Image (tube, coloured by chain):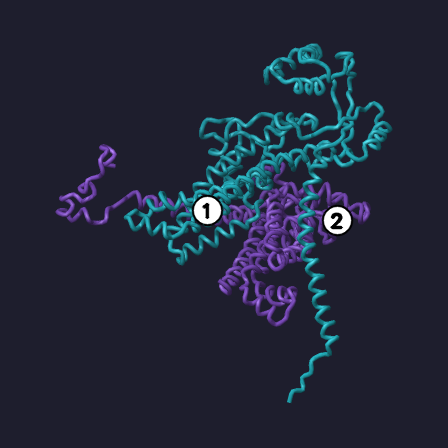
């Protein structure tokens, strides 16, 4: 800042290259900046770190799961083929936990998919911008509520209502129905916002063509726009499944403690996630079969959600290709 | 040639009218789906408020008249102090004084101590807010019948003492001070890790690497997948790596801390940092993407290097977006519960966390624990803790929205 020194305007010579620069060809050569390279290297490492996180998830879970399956007390056939999960008795049949995960997830999806899709259709095809500006943030609030709060809601609001409606003798204090219903409410905003994005991305011309043929708004949205956005909606539903399978706190609080091979939503049963949370909540001694069995469950959970997420992403990519 | 005949006019009109009726009907159905979500949200919030306030029936094991013939509420600070001194053993009194000088405590706090330590207050029954408001007489009659000696009082479980007092095994005196501090520690560590790493990864992906390259695509897919991994799996990762494999580091043994194992704030904070990292990267990428290319080209045009361009031009433009993203990450981290259970948050901690190497508890853990208890008074404090958590989240999100609005105006 040469001109700061004096109060005069900068001299022409302040900007002109020094005479010597013209004499010395090296001055015109690209300057080597080691710091630039160092920064890039650092950023590269940080960028690749996320891949290492995935690898370490697979390795740590796999390592312990391998210990589990290598134990003489456990066989793969027993793990995937039987329906009793009692680590104390040496029984490790994953279906006792999977049944509850399936039941709660199905209940959740029965709530979240139709309602989420209907909400998305309303927001994208019917709502005026003003209504959308009010309702969309509300859905976002619903999506931002911690799951432990949903657990409280399930146990202390939904369960008592169910018990009054269906009879306290038929519905337990802990039951999969209540956990599933509340999980559905939790997933609803995810499905509706992803579906709405997909519906809004369908070109206007398709709708206009439908209206020109005399279609009502319902016919245009259900028979033209929805099929056009199907892969985006599919992605939303699959991500919803993955969220339901991995959800922990709602089921840990409301669906009951103790594995139970049952598909009856009125019964109490423990899901895979709920089991991990309950068992590791106590001070579990390392290196026991109990401890490594949790990693086997977690590995299965990870693989299932991984596949679901990949399918969902593939759907989204397909959808983008179509319209963007 | 023209054999096609239009339907009769009336039939056509009826057909069209029927279609429009169906359309109208379904529009209502769609709207109801949306309203269902809104109703659920209101039900949830009302349910929490319902639990956090309301009448409570309690009794004193000892007669308050033994302290003073006047009602407890009228006693002054010196009188309460005298009562404590007279009725507690010298050791217990000294211990209380040690925690925080008794003379310096507020009247409400002293009254609480008198009730807790001398009169041995016991909660018999709690009533939710809406019943308390609309069925006051019924509750009074019920209490009179069931517990003749009980006193009935309207109580806000969410009060100043609840926020400032540490944990206690008795619901009436439990507070969330330790849990809030634990949550703050946790979130700070998570953000200290996730913010630089997340922004760095986003810069690499957006500004350095070739967007079409295989590596970039792998990293991108991987980040999207990590964002969908169930949080409990991150908990297992944290348990295996931070709690066990890195125990020397996370327990503080490396830094001369001796009295702890790997289940510390540091382990939990790092786990949480890894959990919010994908979210952080995706948001930072969006923010960097939103900076117009013309700015980069202008910087390159005057001879700036890539890093100079990023540091002086791209990052300042992306900063509000990155901040918004970090706030969203913080609000995710504050509410996450499952990984903390796995990593081993202790549920009963009465001292404030002093360093990253201490045992800890966090707000959602407290909510989980208290919700799992059977007694009504624990549900009431769970509701109060939920309100604290929701207020924290609400203020965070409001900040994020304000930032976003300012950002949108400027760009």
Image colour for chain A is purple
Question: Which residue carries the number 1 mark?
Answer: B284
Callout 2: SS: loop
Tally the numbered discs: 2
Instruction: Please state if B73 lies on the left or on the right of A284 as rendered.
Output: right
- Say which of marks 2 and 1 sits in front: 1
Disc marking residue A267: 2
> Farthest residue in the left direction?
A23
Q: Nearer the viewer, residue B188 or B158?
A: B158
Tell me, yes or no, whether the two marked residues, 2 and 1, touch with CB atoms within 8 Å: no
Q: Nearer the viewer, residue B319 or A108?
A: B319
Tell me, by letter, which chain the rendering colours cyan: B
| Residue A14 shows in this picture | yes
Task: In the rendered view, tell whether residue A52 sits above or below residue A118.
Answer: above
Instruction: Please state if A263 lies on the left or on the right of A42 as rendered.
Output: right
- Which quarter of the figure is the N terminus of chain B placed in? bottom right
Q: Residue at x 54, y 34 (%)?
A: B263
| Residue A48 shows in this picture | no
Q: Quadrant of residue B42?
A: top right
Q: Quadrant of residue B179?
A: top right
Disc marking residue B113: none
Say which chain tag 2 marks: A
Q: Nearer the viewer, residue B164 or B15?
A: B15
Mark-to-mark CA distance, 2 and 1 = 44 Å
Give x and y (percent) for residue A77: 62, 55
Say which chain tag 1 marks: B
């Amino acid at each position: 800042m040469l001109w700061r020194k004096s109060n005069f305007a900068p001299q022409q010579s302040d900007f002109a290259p020094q005479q010597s620069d013209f004499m010395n060809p090296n001055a015109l050569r690209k300057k080597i900046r080691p710091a630039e390279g160092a920064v890039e290297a650092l950023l590269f490492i940080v960028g690749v770190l996320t891949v290492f996180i995935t690898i370490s998830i697979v390795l740590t879970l796999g390592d312990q799961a391998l210990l589990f399956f290598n134990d003489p007390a456990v066989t793969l056939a027993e793990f995937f083929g039987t329906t009793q999960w009692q680590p104390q008795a040496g029984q490790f049949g994953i279906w006792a936990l999977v049944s509850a995960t399936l039941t709660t997830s199905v209940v959740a999806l029965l709530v979240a998919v139709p309602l989420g899709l209907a909400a998305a259709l309303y927001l994208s095809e019917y709502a005026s911008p003003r209504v959308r500006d009010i309702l969309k943030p509300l859905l976002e609030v619903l999506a931002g509520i911690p799951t432990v709060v949903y657990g409280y809601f399930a146990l202390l609001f939904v369960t008592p209502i169910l018990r009054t409606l269906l009879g306290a003798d038929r519905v337990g204090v802990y039951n999969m129905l209540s956990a599933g219903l509340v999980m559905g409410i939790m997933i609803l905003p995810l499905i509706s916002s992803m579906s709405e994005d997909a519906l809004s991305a369908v070109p206007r011309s398709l709708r206009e063509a439908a209206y020109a043929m005399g279609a009502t708004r319902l016919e245009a949205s259900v028979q033209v726009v929805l099929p056009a956005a199907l892969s985006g909606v599919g992605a939303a539903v699959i991500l919803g499944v993955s969220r339901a399978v991995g959800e922990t706190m709602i089921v840990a609080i409301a669906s009951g403690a103790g594995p139970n091979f049952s598909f009856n939503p009125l019964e109490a049963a423990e899901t895979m996630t709920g089991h991990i949370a309950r068992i590791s909540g106590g001070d579990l001694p390392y290196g026991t079969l109990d401890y490594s069995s949790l990693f086997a469950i977690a590995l299965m959970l990870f693989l299932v959600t991984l596949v679901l997420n990949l399918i969902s992403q593939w759907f989204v990519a397909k959808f983008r290709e179509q319209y963007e | 040639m023209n054999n096609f005949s239009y339907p009769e006019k009336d039939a056509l009109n009826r057909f069209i009218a029927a279609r429009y009726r169906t359309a109208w009907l379904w529009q209502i159905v769609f709207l109801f789906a949306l309203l269902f979500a809104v109703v659920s949200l209101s039900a949830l919030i009302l349910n929490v408020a319902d639990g956090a306030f309301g009448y409570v029936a309690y009794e004193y094991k000892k007669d308050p008249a033994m302290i003073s013939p006047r009602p407890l509420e009228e006693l002054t600070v010196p009188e309460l102090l005298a009562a404590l001194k007279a009725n507690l053993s010298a050791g217990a009194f000294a211990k209380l004084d040690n925690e925080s000088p008794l003379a310096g405590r507020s009247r409400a706090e002293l009254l609480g101590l008198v009730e807790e330590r001398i009169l041995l207050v016991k909660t018999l029954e709690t009533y939710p807010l809406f019943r308390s408001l609309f069925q006051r007489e019924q509750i009074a009659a019920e209490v009179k019948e069931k517990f003749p000696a009980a006193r009935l009082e309207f109580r806000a479980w969410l009060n100043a003492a609840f926020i400032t007092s540490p944990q206690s095994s008795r619901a009436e005196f439990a507070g969330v001070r330790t849990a809030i501090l634990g949550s703050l520690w946790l979130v700070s560590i998570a953000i200290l890790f996730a913010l630089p790493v997340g922004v760095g990864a986003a810069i690499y992906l957006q500004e350095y690497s070739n967007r079409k390259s295989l590596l970039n695509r792998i990293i991108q897919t991987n980040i999207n997948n990590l964002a969908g991994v169930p949080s409990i799996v991150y908990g297992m990762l944290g348990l295996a790596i931070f709690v066990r494999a890195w125990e020397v580091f996370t327990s503080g043994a490396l830094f001369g801390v001796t009295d702890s194992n790997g289940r510390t704030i540091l382990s939990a904070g790092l786990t949480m940092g890894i959990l919010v990292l994908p979210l952080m990267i995706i948001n930072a990428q969006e923010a960097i993407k939103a900076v117009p290319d013309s700015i980069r080209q202008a910087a390159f045009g005057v001879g700036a290097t890539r890093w100079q361009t990023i540091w002086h031009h791209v990052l300042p433009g992306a900063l509000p977006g990155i901040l918004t993203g970090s706030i969203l990450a913080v609000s995710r981290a504050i509410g996450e519960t499952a990984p903390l259970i796995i990593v081993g948050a202790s549920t009963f901690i009465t001292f404030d966390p002093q360093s990253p190497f201490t045992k800890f508890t966090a707000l959602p853990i407290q909510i989980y624990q208290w919700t799992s208890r059977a007694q009504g008074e624990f549900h009431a404090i769970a509701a109060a803790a939920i309100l604290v958590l929701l207020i924290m989240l609400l203020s965070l999100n409001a900040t994020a929205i304000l930032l976003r609005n300012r950002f949108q105006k400027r760009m």
